[in-house]
Amino acid sequence: MSEGTTYPARLDGRRAIVTGAGSGIGRAIALRFAGEGARVLVADVDVAAAGRVADEIGTNGLSHQVDVAHATEMQSLVERATAEWGGLDVMVNNAGVGVAATTPDTDESDWDRLMDINLKGTFLGMKYAIPALRDSGGGCVINISSVAALVGVADRAAYSAAKGGILALTRAAAIDHIAEGVRINCICPGTVDTPWVRRITEDLPEPEVARAAMRARQPHGRLVSVDEIAAMAAYLASDEAGSIVGAAMIVDGGLTAR
């Protein structure tokens, strides 16, 4: 949250978990939720990073170390939230990793890692959060997919497959659980200005040229900000989005409109 920024209290009293919340999109979502009045369990494999974000939030923030690819850890994460707060209202499955490679150039170990963290991690988050949301009288799940689930993106074969799986899982689960009062949607960001994007460009021979190309492929001429993704997540978590079910909310500066 920018200092002095105020938001509407649409999430006042809501109890939320955000995975991968130690940095990037997850951190922005956690801070935005707190800014709108939610209590947030900041979950990340990097416990120190999660702790720093929880400290930024203050009394409404808790931190928790989790590897989203492990069922017992995801179950414990949801149990922590319900034990601390007596229930759960919002689950954001944001944790993810990426590899820049074509299909032939993707190592099998990288494929397995992306599927475990991105797709299986989202599945496990839903597996354990949906019953808790149902027991709380309803709530919502927000999964972070990508425009790579919707259009072809060069050198992102495994990443696209995992994010496409998240989109399909979101739609199937949305139909399964809406009658129980659980709304499930996903966000499909374009190229977002995150630490991961900065890292992958730094390893290239001409980092500035690569970053310029990323900006140029989005019609509005810049990278998407993490705060723009957080704003969409806050909307989906609010009562204003009561009729948004099984949707893929695209925030990409026009990339998929070409």
Image: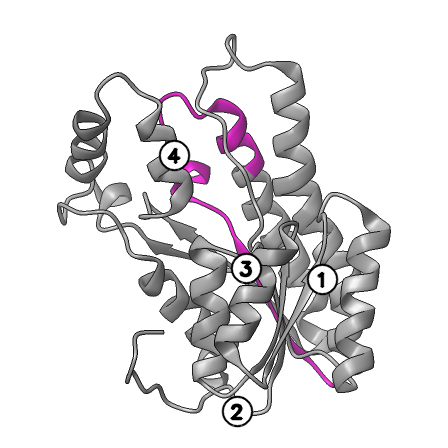
Q: Residue at x 55, y 84 (%)?
A: 38
Q: Are marks 3 and 2 in contact (CB under 8 Å)?
A: no
Residue 1 lies left or right of residue 109; in this view the side is left
Vertical relation: 243 (above or below) 128: below
| Sequence order check, earlier mark of 3 and 1 | 3
Question: Between marks 4 and 3, how big is the CA–CA gap?
Answer: 18 Å
The numbered disc on residue 12 is: 2
Q: Earlier in the sequence, mark 3 or mark 2?
A: 2
Seen at 78% across and 56% down, the residue is: 74
- What's the distance in space between the residues labelled 3 and 1, CA to CA? 27 Å
In the shown orientation, is residue 229 left or right of residue 38?
left
How far apart in space, not on screen, are marks 4 and 2 (Cα)? Answer: 36 Å
Q: Which residues are magenta?
A: 137-162
- Residue 76 placement (x, y as % from top left): 83, 62
Q: In the displayed image of the protein, which residue is found farthest to the right? A: 72
Q: Indicate the position of residue 113 as horizontal and vertical percent values.
A: 66, 30
